[in-house]
Each structure stands twice: as structure tokens, then as C-alpha cells.
Image (cartoon, coloured by chain):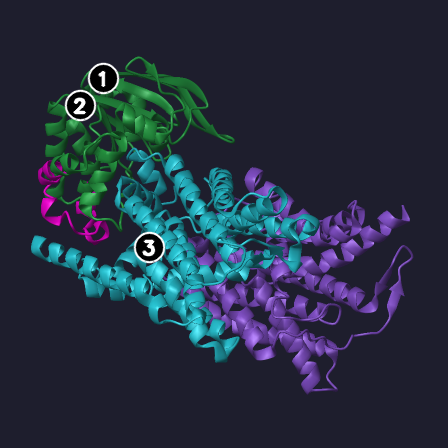
């Protein structure tokens, strides 16, 4: 029983961080109707920027570094969205759905190799936020991971506030439901697209920066989180914000419990991500709307 | 050609798009279908042509049950349709556009023979000189004609035209009228959905009015026109197209 | 019109012939190293062109292509290791196995739109890769599965391998060309343009979508099989997503709607990667950038338009691309069915 609780606790703690990144993906899908296949690479960039900020400015508060990384990546996202995604919504691109898949995938390919070329293949790891571990009763968790989780929770809360209580949040909701109607009432859908994309990739970057001290950063560190994010948003329902939070926690649990109870522990670790993937494939086949989502527009 | 539409209903979740529609088509008819927006006209066409499967009811074509057949099967059996917004194959040439249906319905068809047939059909629709141009470079009106050409290539017994007159200029209107009359004279049946009252009344020998997914009236256009229910539901109101 | 057609057709044959002769003569004056580079290049050309048939012609942008290639490679590798089955038979089995999986995947993804198709095929590919890694007792995982060479016990000369790979490439290209120029090709393009309209015009969409998956996955499996018996050591890393990305980049930069351009994209990019070796990791950065820019500004690819200009087969009425795309966008907005 203790084992189960320990696994569950770990699952929830990681799940919250997964949810933050998945929330970014959901935002992007919900507003732009595009699945960002480069989401993992923005996560990766967040990790790298945080590392280099902390290395260059030794006295820098790590949380400031995390925030700044998010900001930097958001700017990169903004530039990309403006030059490569906006034309889709201006009717300048043939066959937009295929284009969206390919261009974000192409970006992923480009960014991964850019990171490899600039930073090299060797892992980098920023210093921890806090050292040591915390005893939660059922399980001991490294303070870094717990911190990352708590911060993610706070950010998720802030985001929910933003979406539901502020004007921008409501404007985003409007665009996600009906682009043309939103335009009619004076909301600029193109600007909302840019905001959603920058914000979305910024969240991925923050997740990356938060987890950087716990796991090392490498150019391909975003691959697994990327796929995990797809799994989460499909499970939770594409375009559903609460769905991505629930989905995140769910996947955290699935991975933790799956690895923990797999008959062969060494293989369990290798198969960890595949549990989510198999569920993901099944959901795509049988219930593509997930548990909360709307139909793809 | 004989088509029996028996008690066909179609619902999507909570929405009843077609409600117990029963119709009988016999021989060579020229039928107009009218009704307010949302009356189920396009759903009707989609259900007849296999894009939707009826929730209830049957479709019997020439004695054979075609309920639930896929669209390409229905086309092979002799029912063809156009789309409300023209859907030609944009990045294929006009010739390729008409070859697709010809080759699709008859696997043994000879490429060269079909090309000859295609040129005749294109000629009939004044498109032959454009045969090597990409469909997307055609004007809207020419694309409408292209769809009509594609229809002819499958040699259907029943042709369903969904809003063929929408946004069509008078000269093109003439061509389409001519098309309908010529093909009808060959013994084919037409079902034409339109909001264009003058065209419908000029063409139709039988008028069906759909309202909230049900058949409100079915018969001689002049009689249907005077039907009080029809006037209240549709004809008497302002057109908001 | 007709005279020009005949001319461009003859030109195509002549140019093709010249390329073929060059390819056949390469082993006479090339070092072993470059033979190796070209063998690998032909392998990628096979993958890029078969992917372009699936994606460019049929409009199915699948990310599972390398998975089918790996199925071909591992099938023949495992059959050889555990059942002593010889290379040629192993490759046949590998091809069939890949085709079978292609059939399954093709059937499963029938209703999927672009994003879902991408997601599902990525998932399929990653699940397969994890299984290959997870069952390393059987597959040798990252240590690598040893595979006998296609000919003999060791690879003494690469020349026969060069000709074999070239032959496989040519045979598959001919097959795909025949398919693309037959009525099947017409149907595939119609499906790509507008699936529902194609169905309304009598095209059996299910049959041809699945057929394309089966054919292209078999070609990928075939490529994987020959590759395995040439490289003699395979790991699950042959099918990682970045490898899929490379093949996609080759096809798109070459010209995703032209089999020949995609194949040339494969060859040129692979050879360039070798030529630019000293740039290290920056090579792929350049190609990544090329991919993005090509997608955004030159959808038809970079090689395909050059080919078309040279052959005189440039499509007509291309002038109004912008306005047509804008027209399409407006129609999409109005037509909410």
C-alpha cells in the first residue's frame, strides 16, 4: 500500500509539471487549430536558456532565470508564428492542415539540430534550486522536483485565472470557439493567434527550465515530453484546458504506476512512455475527442 | 429508373435532420426541391448518395436495396450529385477531372476511349478548349460546368443538383438550363435543390417542399404553390439568402 | 502543343538515360568510400520517393515510414539470426511483414485528418521503437543486431552492392511511376484534392488509400531489408523520429509531388551531407532551415521546378496561385458543412 501511495504521489507531482507543458499545447491547438510538433523543442530551449542564464549571471535568482527563459522562448515563438503560421490564416498557404503539421515538424527538426550544433551533444545541468529532498510521509521527493511541481501548480492556477477572468482570456476563449464571430466583435484573431502561440511555447519552456536541474538538458531532451504532451491533450480532449490538467496528472500516474508495477523492473523503465502511447493510440482510434474535448474544427 | 425512399429518417445526436421521408421516383422526372434553410435539403442529398447512412428507413434503387452503401458505390449504381459549393479537383486538369469518374466506375474502361467520350462531354459544356488547364484557374461558373461534366461521365440515371443556380450569371444560367433539358430528354431524372424560385418553377414538373426534415408537399408545382401550409412555411416569407 | 509534348518526352528519356549511364559507370572511377555514400543515398532515395507517393500523391502525411523500413530490416535480421533464413528470403519476408503492417495502419487511419494521422503514426513508430529497445534480449537493442551480408560471408567489394541497391531503386521507381501514371495515380490525386468529391465521383477511397499504404510500406520494408544486409548491424536508432524528419526533408526539398524529384532530393541531400562533413552538426541545421523555407515559400520543392523548367513540363496557369489560395480560404470560411 505504501508502495502504491509512493508511486501515486510521484505520479501526481510529475503530472502537474506535465500538465503545464500540455496546457501550452492545448492553448495553441485551441486558438490556432494547429498541433505544435515542435513543442518539445521549446521545452528544450527553456532548459538551455535557463542553464546559460544561470551560468552567465552567477548571482541570478533561479526563478528569475526560469521566468526569463520562458520570456525569451516566447519571443522566439512569436517570431515563428508571425512568419510561418500567420500566412496560413491569411489564406496564403495551400492545404493548411498538412502545412501546419510539416512546418512545426520542420521547426522541431531545425531546433533540435541547432541545439546540437550550438550546445553540443553533452548533457548540461544547471545547479539545483534547492538541495536535498523532502519527506512527504509516503515518499521522499527531491526538493527541486517538488519546487518545480508547486510552481507549475501556481502557474496553472494563474493561467486559469487569466483565461476565465481577464479580458484577454475571454478574447482567447472567443477566438477558440468561433474565429469569425470574434472578429466581428472587434477581437483581432491574428493577434490572439500570436499571443496564444507565444504563451503556449513559453509554458513549455518554463516546464523545461523547471525540470532542468532534475534531469539534464540535451538537444533531444524534448522528444519524450513532446509525445507525452500529445498523449495528454488527446486524452484530456483537444482544446480543453481542464482536460489538459487532468490529463497531465493522469499520465503522470499511468507512467509512475506502469513502471512501478511492470513485472520486469528494468524493462518497465523502457516501456514507461509506451503505456501512455498505447492508451493514446487507442483513444485516437476510438474516442478522438478524449474525455473533455470538442471535435476538431 | 425507379427509386423508393421508404420512411427515411436521419438524426445527428439530438437533431432530427430528416423525419420519416417517403418518396417515390419513377421514370424520367424533373423534380424541384425547395424549403427554408435548415429544412434538411442537403442532408437529404447526402443521405441519398451514401454520405450519410439513414438512421431509419430504406432506399431501394431499381429494386435493389442501396441503404448504407458508400458514396462511390451509389455513384456506380447510377445516382450522381453536385455540391453546393463546387468541388472540382483543383490541382488537376479539366481533362483529368472528367476522366476520374469515367475510369472510377468502370474498371475495364479503356483510357483512350474515355478520353474521346470526355472531349464530347466537355464540348457539350463549352469547356473543351480548357481541357489542359488546371481546374483552379477556371472561373466559378466554369467550375460549376466542370462538375456537371463530371456528373455526365458516370452516366447516372438520377442527377441531384444542389443549388446549381447560386451566384450564376444569366448566360451561364442558359447553359445550365440547356444541360438539364438535353440530359432530361435522354431519359434521365433530375432532382434540383434551389432557392431560385423562378428557375425552379420554370423547370420542375414536380415540386417537393421540405420543412424541418419532413415532406410538407409533393406534387404539381402550380398546386403546391397554392398550398396554404407551403405559403406559410416558405413562400410567403421574405427570402433571406 | 503535341510537338512540344513529344519533345519534352524525348528530353525526359534522354536526360534519364544520361543519368542512368552515369550511375552505371560510377564504380569504374569512384573510390570505395563514395560507393558507400551512394549506396546509402540510393537507400534514402527509395525512402524519400516512396514517402512522396504516400504523402504527395495520396496526401497521407504519415510519420510511420521509417517504422516500416525497420520492420523490413529487423524481420530479415531476426529470421536470419534465430532461424537461419538466408538474406534474400529474409528480405522477402521483411517486405511482406512491412506490407502487412502497412495494411493494418492504412486501414486504421482511414478517417484521420492530417494532425491525427501524424500523431497516430508517430505513436506507432515510437511504440515499435520502444518494443525493439525493450526486448533487447531478442533484438540486441542498442548493442546492435548482427546481420549477414547479402552476398557471401563478408563484404569484400562494395561494387555488387552498389549495383544491387541501384537496381532495387530503379525497379521500385519504375513500379511507382507506373502506378502514379495509371488510373490509380489519378484516383490518388483526386483523393488528395478532395476525398469526399472523389467518393462522389465513384472513387473507392478506402481501397486506394490502403493500397498506397501497402505499396509504400512494402517499398520501405524492402529498402530496410537490403539496407540491413549491407550495413550488417542495425539498432532501433535507424527509425528514430529525426531520421523520419530527414526523409521528409529530402522529399519536400526535392519536391513532394514528384517521385523523381523526391528521389533526387534524397540522393543530393545524402551526398551533400557527406561532402559537407566538416560542418558537423551544422549540416542538418542547414537542411532543417531549407525544409522550413521550402515549405513556406516553395511548396513544390526546389528540385521539381528546375526539372519542370528543363523538361518544359511546367504546369499551366500557375500565375494566379496567390489569389486561388485566398479564394479557397474564403470558401472555407463560408462553407461550414
Residue A56's place in the image compared with A260, above or below, is below
Hue of chain C? cyan
From the image, tell me which residue sits under label 3: C259
- Of A284 and C214, nearer the camera is C214
Other-residue count near label 1 (Cα within 10 Å), few / some / many at <14 / 14–19 / ≥20: some
Q: Which chain does tag 2 point to?
A: B
Q: Earlier in the sequence, mark 1 or mark 2?
A: 1
Which residue is located at x 69 percent, y 61 percent? A156
- Of C198 and A293, nearer the camera is C198
Which quadrant of the view contains residue B239?
A: top left
Residue A197's place in the image compared with C81, above or below, is below
From the image, tell me which residue sits under label 1: B1
User: Which one is in front in this view, the residue at disc 1 or the one at disc 3?
Assistant: 3
Chain ID, green in image = B
From the top left corner, tell me how far across and down residue B234 is, in percent: 30, 30
Segment colored magenta: B118-144
Q: Which chain does tag 1 point to?
A: B
Residue C209's place in the image compared with B212, above or below, is below
Element type at mark 2: loop
Direction from residue B11 to residue B84 in the image, left or right: left
In the rendered image, residue B140 lying in the magenta stretch gets the answer yes
Q: Which mark is residue C247?
A: none
From the top left corner, tell me how far across and down residue B228 is, in percent: 29, 21
Looking at the image, the residue that sits furthest to the top is B63
Q: Main secondary structure of the magenta part?
A: helix
- Of A281 and C327, nearer the camera is A281
Other-residue count near label 2 (Cα within 10 Å), few / some / many at <14 / 14–19 / ≥20: many
Which residue is located at x 74 percent, y 51 percent? A267
Dots 1, 2 in contact, CB < 8 A: yes
Hue of chain A? purple
Amino acid at each position: 500500500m505504501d508502495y502504491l501511495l509512493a508511486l501515486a504521489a510521484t505520479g501526481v507531482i510529475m503530472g502537474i509539471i506535465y500538465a503545464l507543458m500540455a496546457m501550452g499545447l492545448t492553448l495553441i491547438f485551441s486558438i490556432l487549430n494547429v498541433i505544435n510538433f515542435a513543442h518539445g523543442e521549446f521545452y528544450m530551449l527553456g532548459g538551455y536558456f535557463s542553464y546559460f542564464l544561470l551560468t552567465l549571471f552567477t548571482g541570478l535568482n533561479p526563478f528569475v532565470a526560469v521566468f526569463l527563459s520562458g520570456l525569451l522562448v516566447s519571443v522566439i515563438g512569436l517570431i515563428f508564428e508571425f512568419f510561418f503560421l500567420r500566412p496560413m490564416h491569411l489564406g496564403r498557404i495551400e492545404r493548411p492542415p498538412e502545412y501546419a503539421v510539416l512546418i512545426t515538424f520542420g521547426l522541431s527538426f531545425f531546433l533540435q539540430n541547432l541545439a546540437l550544433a550550438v550546445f553540443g551533444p553533452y548533457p548540461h545541468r544547471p545547479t539545483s534550486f534547492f538541495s536535498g529532498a523532502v519527506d512527504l510521509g509516503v515518499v521522499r521527493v527531491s526538493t527541486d522536483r517538488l519546487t518545480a511541481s508547486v510552481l507549475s501548480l501556481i502557474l496553472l492556477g494563474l493561467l486559469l485565472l487569466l483565461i476565465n477572468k481577464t479580458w484577454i482570456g475571454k478574447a482567447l476563449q472567443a477566438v477558440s470557439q468561433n474565429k469569425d464571430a470574434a472578429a466581428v466583435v472587434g477581437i483581432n484573431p491574428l493577434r490572439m493567434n500570436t499571443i496564444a502561440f507565444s504563451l503556449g511555447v513559453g509554458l513549455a519552456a518554463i516546464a523545461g527550465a523547471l525540470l532542468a536541474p532534475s534531469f539534464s538538458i540535451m538537444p533531444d531532451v524534448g522528444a519524450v515530453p513532446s509525445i507525452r504532451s500529445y498523449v495528454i491533450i488527446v486524452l484530456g480532449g483537444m482544446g480543453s484546458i481542464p482536460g489538459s490538467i487532468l490529463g497531465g496528472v493522469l499520465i503522470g500516474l499511468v507512467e509512475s504506476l506502469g513502471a512501478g508495477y511492470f513485472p520486469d523492473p528494468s524493462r518497465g523503465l523502457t516501456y514507461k512512455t509506451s503505456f501512455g502511447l498505447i492508451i493514446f493510440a487507442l483513444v485516437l482510434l476510438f474516442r478522438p475527442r478524449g474525455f473533455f474535448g470538442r471535435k476538431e474544427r | 429508373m425507379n427509386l423508393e425512399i421508404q420512411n427515411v429518417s436521419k438524426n445527428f445526436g439530438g437533431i432530427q435532420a430528416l423525419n420519416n421521408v417517403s418518396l417515390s421516383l419513377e421514370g424520367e422526372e424533373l423534380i424541384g426541391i425547395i424549403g427554408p434553410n435548415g429544412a434538411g435539403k442537403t442532408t437529404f442529398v447526402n443521405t441519398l448518395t451514401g454520405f450519410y447512412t439513414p438512421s431509419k428507413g430504406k432506399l431501394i434503387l431499381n429494386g435493389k436495396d442501396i441503404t448504407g452503401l458508400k458514396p462511390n458505390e451509389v455513384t456506380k449504381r447510377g445516382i450522381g450529385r453536385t455540391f453546393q459549393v463546387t468541388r472540382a479537383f483543383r490541382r488537376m486538369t479539366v481533362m483529368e477531372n472528367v476522366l476520374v469518374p469515367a475510369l472510377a466506375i468502370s474498371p475495364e474502361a479503356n483510357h483512350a476511349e474515355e478520353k474521346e467520350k470526355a472531349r464530347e462531354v466537355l464540348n457539350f459544356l463549352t469547356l473543351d478548349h480548357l481541357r489542359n488547364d488546371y481546374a483552379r484557374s477556371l472561373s466559378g461558373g466554369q467550375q460549376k460546368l466542370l462538375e456537371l461534366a463530371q456528373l455526365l461521365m458516370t452516366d447516372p440515371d438520377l442527377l441531384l443538383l444542389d443549388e446549381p443556380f447560386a451566384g450564376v450569371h444569366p448566360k451561364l444560367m442558359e447553359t445550365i438550363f440547356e444541360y438539364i433539358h438535353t440530359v432530361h430528354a435522354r431519359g434521365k431524372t433530375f432532382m434540383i435543390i434551389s432557392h431560385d424560385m423562378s428557375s425552379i418553377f420554370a423547370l420542375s414538373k414536380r415540386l417537393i417542399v421540405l420543412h424541418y426534415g419532413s415532406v410538407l408537399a409533393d406534387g404539381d408545382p402550380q398546386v403546391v404553390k397554392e398550398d396554404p401550409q407551403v405559403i406559410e412555411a416558405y413562400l410567403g416569407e421574405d427570402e433571406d439568402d | 502543343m503535341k510537338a512540344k509534348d513529344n519533345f519534352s518526352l524525348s528530353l525526359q528519356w534522354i536526360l534519364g538515360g544520361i543519368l542512368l549511364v552515369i550511375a552505371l559507370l560510377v564504380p569504374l572511377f569512384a573510390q570505395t568510400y563514395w560507393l558507400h555514400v551512394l549506396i546509402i543515398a540510393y537507400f534514402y532515395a527509395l525512402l524519400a520517393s516512396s514517402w512522396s507517393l504516400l504523402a504527395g500523391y495520396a496526401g497521407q502525411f504519415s510519420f510511420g515510414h521509417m517504422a516500416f523500413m525497420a520492420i523490413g530490416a529487423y524481420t530479415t535480421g531476426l529470421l536470419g539470426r534465430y532461424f537461419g533464413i538466408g538474406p534474400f528470403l529474409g528480405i522477402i519476408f521483411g517486405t511482406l511483414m512491412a506490407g502487412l503492417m502497412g495494411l493494418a495502419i492504412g486501414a486504421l487511419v482511414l478517417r484521420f485528418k492530417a494532425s491525427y494521422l501524424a500523431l497516430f503514426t508517430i505513436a506507432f513508430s515510437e511504440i515499435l521503437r520502444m518494443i525493439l529497445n525493450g526486448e533487447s534480449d531478442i533484438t540486441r537493442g542498442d548493442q546492435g543486431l548482427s546481420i549477414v551480408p547479402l552476398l557471401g560471408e563478408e563484404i569484400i567489394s562494395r561494387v555488387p552492392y552498389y549495383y544491387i541497391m541501384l537496381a532495387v531503386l530503379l525497379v521500385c521507381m519504375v513500379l511507382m511511376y507506373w502506378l502514379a501514371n495509371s488510373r490509380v495515380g489519378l484516383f490518388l490525386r483526386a483523393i488528395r484534392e478532395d476525398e469526399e468529391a472523389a467518393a462522389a465521383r465513384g472513387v473507392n477511397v478506402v481501397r486506394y488509400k490502403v493500397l498506397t499504404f501497402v505499396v509504400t510500406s512494402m517499398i520501405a520494408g524492402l529498402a530496410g531489408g537490403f539496407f540491413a544486409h549491407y550495413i550488417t548491424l542495425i539498432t532501433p536508432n535507424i527509425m528514430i523520429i529525426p531520421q523520419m524528419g530527414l526523409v521528409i526533408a529530402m522529399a519536400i526539398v526535392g519536391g513532394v509531388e514528384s517521385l523523381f524529384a523526391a528521389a533526387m532530393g534524397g540522393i543530393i541531400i545524402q551526398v551533400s551531407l557527406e561532402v559537407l562533413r566538416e560542418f558537423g552538426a551544422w549540416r542538418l541545421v542547414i537542411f532543417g532551415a531549407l525544409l522550413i523555407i521550402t515549405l513556406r515559400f516553395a511548396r513544390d520543392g526546389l528540385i521539381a521546378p528546375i526539372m519542370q523548367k528543363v523538361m518544359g513540363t511546367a504546369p499551366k496557369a500557375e500565375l494566379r496561385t496567390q489569389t486561388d489560395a485566398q479564394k479557397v480560404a474564403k470558401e472555407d470560411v463560408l462553407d461550414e458543412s
